[in-house]
Amino acid sequence: MQKIILAKTGNEAMALAMKQVNPDVVAAYPITPATEIVQIFSQYVADGEVKTEFVAVESEHSAMSACIGSCAAGARTMTGTSSQGLALMYEMIYIAAGLRLPIVMADVNRALSAPINIHCDHSDSMGCRDAGWVHIFSENAQEAYDSMIQAVRIAEHKDVRLPVMVTTDGFIISHGMERIDTLPDAEVQNFIGKYDPLMHLLDVKKPFTIGAINLTDYYFEHRRAMVDAQNNSLKVIKEVGAEFGKKFDTGYGLIEKYQLDDAEVAIVALGSTCGTAKVVIDQLRAKGVKAGLLKIRVFRPFPTEEIAKALENIKTVAVLDRSDSVGGFGGPVFTEIRSALYGSAKRPQIAGFVYGLGGREIDMEQIEGLFMDLKAGKVKADSVSYLGVRE
Amino acid sequence: MSELKKYKELALGGNIEKGGTAVDFKTGDWRSSRPVYNPENCIQCLFCWVYCPDSAVILKDGKVAGFNLEHCKGCGICAHECPGKKKVKAIVMEEEVK
Amino acid sequence: MANLKELAARGDKFTGGHRACAGCGASIVARQALLAAGDKPVVVTCATGCLEVVSTIFPYTAWDVPFIHSAFENSAATISGVEAAYKSLHRQGTVKEDIRFLAFGGDGGTYDIGLQALSGAMERGHNMLYICYDNQAYMNTGIQRSSATPRGSSTTTSPNGKKIPGKIQFRKNLTEIMAAHGIPYVAQSVVGNWSDFTKKVEKALAKGGPAFIAVLQPCRLGWGYPPELTAELGRLAVETNFWPLYEVEDGRYKLNATPKERKPIGEWMFQQERFRHLKKPEHQSIIDDIQKDIDARWEQLNKKCSL
Ligand SMILES: Cc1ncc(C[n+]2csc(CCOP(=O)(O)OP(=O)(O)O)c2C)c(N)n1
Ligand code: SF4
Ligand code: SF4
Ligand code: SF4
Ligand SMILES: [Mg+2]
């Protein structure tokens, strides 16, 4: 199969994936740095390049509400947002998951106010990590494109039926131009197949009620069912990623190990920072430093076992968090990983680093410095520090 | 009340898979008084039927035929709205004896 | 427009067995609206509030139509998503029926927290009818004031106290705000006039495009009156000109009922507990204010209707 090589920003790549998915409905609202996704998609609609009914809603709360209505009505439904927009949706994010609606959303990660800031960190999507959505992070525009396509399959899989959010780092990926391999429209359509809603509102001869109130007798059971769906999705994400790889050469898993198996010192990161880290690792390896990276692609469901296994032979690990759990012990990635390792017989020393809030740059020197500190034993185990802030 | 189901036995997303299942829920025991129908005074205007909040006025062939006492909560709207014949109502409320 | 025999022949799509208070006006609104919509398939949503809570306690639903509830402030946005799905799937040929879309919201879910979503949906022109069942307070959470609560009314957040005798402000005129959207159909109706209400629902649905009906809905608990008076108190609100029945069709105003003789507002207010404190002579000025406001609004409305 011939891939089509294009120069695209992350936003353009995600919008293109949406076009090729050709959803029945998109309801969305603009916000920096995700605005372009909405704009580009609107142009596809205006030019008749998609069959999509586009709902230009008056807020993100209504965007997700309309997506919920649309998806419950049996339409393949997508949207995109960022930061304050995701925060405004928060109430509906839980509802979309609780009603088990396979909506796919692009979220361009941006810091949350206050102070207001338009640049990247992960606090927006991390803020709804417990809602029941599948969260897939992207290292670059290519991954964002590929994951948007896979997300449709994952969300709609009968053992999952959960909404999926694919994120990119605001500006870093969303506005960075890259060379990406894209697929012909027909290949995307073949890959995703048809959406089969089990029940839907437009099936008027079979009336049913969605969104009923549960009292103490049923709420817990319905939430419990979501846990199974999240667990099932671990397998489904891997299967879909492998099938994608078989068909289109680049496979995907829950995590990615980079020079990790024989590493002495390692970092764990999400998103675009992984790209930077890989370059640093190559340089360090050339100098004989056994550095490695564990990239987490899928944060929800959290691949607990794979992560524990991947890290078991490392001496010291630094976990990079691009968001903080203010008042907690470290950022969300750190606490999750620390907890994942707790049951392992062999486990590394681990320290947390919160970095890059509000788009604060992290450069190669900093990452290299971190590796060297780890190697020199200068990083205190079970500590949390702030990297790159003026203290 | 049917037996409580385990989580794996429930429909996806908490859906209630059929419409109108509330008919299986009885609200009749909320009543402190009950409507009593006297067809002799009835002009079949159907006001009782159209204003009943609980869909509890039973019609047969488009005519009032009594009340569904499993749902009727005894609000008295039917009796109040009933014009009856010559100012004599066809529905009166009577205290429920328990 | 269907008469009672025809409505009866359609059969109920809002069933008994729901948990509303005995004599609840909101269930009358839902029932009559579905009877009126009944000859065409309809998909329904309802905002969080009394109507939704009493009618969908799992595993029991009073809705014998496809029904979705998602949250409190977004019933207009939710139904606009359903309608967008319909447009798309109908265009693609996968859904063949001719389906109507109906959203319910209480006054809290419509005048207050859901106003933005409603305004947005109306401006976008979705093919939907929004029915606000207006019981003039947040009943589901225990009778708190809303911007639909009338002046003087005692609610749990505008209580009658030693210094302040109930709600200070007059109510917002949402029907006029909706008319200002320039949508094809806007109307006011009331629980207690089945023919006015069902006609308006039929008309709104037949017209197509966005439509809005505000229905004044007596609430025996929040207003404080014996349950059998629900329909009568609705009619009395019309006879006092407190709640005129009118419609705005393609921008043209039309009064649907003119009381032979306008009854003084006290006749309506003093049948209700929520206004009882205003019976005290020292509060006569409040009653006078309310009466003045009603008369002024009536005059304005009549001017619009004679244009
Ligand atoms: C975002 C949000 N805020 C508050 C509530 C709590 N709440 C539920 S229903 C309701 C009031 C409903 O009032 P109204 O819309 O007038 O309907 P009614 O109960 O009177 O029928 C409130 C405040 C909620 N569910 N969601
Ligand atoms: S008493 Fe009320 S609930 Fe019972 S039949 Fe009459 S109107 Fe319906
Ligand atoms: S309201 Fe009275 S007169 Fe009219 S149909 Fe009912 S019982 Fe008969
Ligand atoms: S409080 Fe009022 S609106 Fe709510 S169920 Fe009772 S009567 Fe109906
Ligand atoms: Mg209310």
Image (spheres, coloured by chain):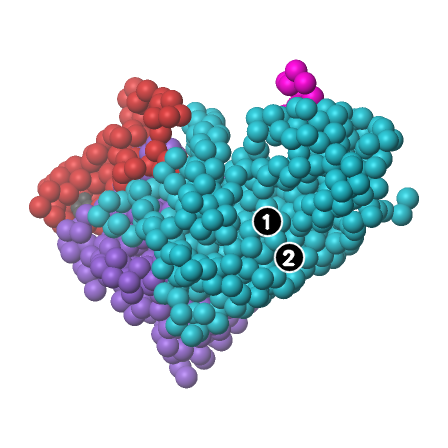
Chain colours: A cyan, B red, C purple
Please give the name of the residue rendered at 30% of the width and 70% of the height, measured from the top-left corner.
Answer: C207
Disc 2 element: loop
Please give the name of the residue rendered at 41% of the width and 40% of the height, measured from the top-left corner.
Answer: A161
The residue beneath circle 2 is: A173
Work out whether residue A77 or residue A89 is closer to the camera in this orientation and state it: A77
Q: Chain of mark 2?
A: A
Callout 1, which amino acid?
A: Ser
Disc 1 element: loop
Please give the name of the residue rendered at 15% of the width and 56% of the height, measured from the top-left corner.
Answer: C6
Work out whether residue A363 or residue C124 is closer to the camera in this orientation and state it: A363
The percent position of residue A320, horizontal first and vertical second, equals 73, 39
Work out whether residue C166 or residue A292 is closer to the camera in this orientation and state it: A292
Mark 1 and 2 residues: CB-CB less than 8 Å, in contact?
yes
Callout 2, which amino acid?
A: Ile
Segment tinted magenta in the rendering: A336-347
Of labels 1 and 2, earlier in sequence is 1
- Name the side, left or right, on which C288 lies relative to C75: right
The residue beneath circle 1 is: A138
For the image, the number of numbered tags is 2
Work out whether residue A319 or residue C22 is closer to the camera in this orientation and state it: A319
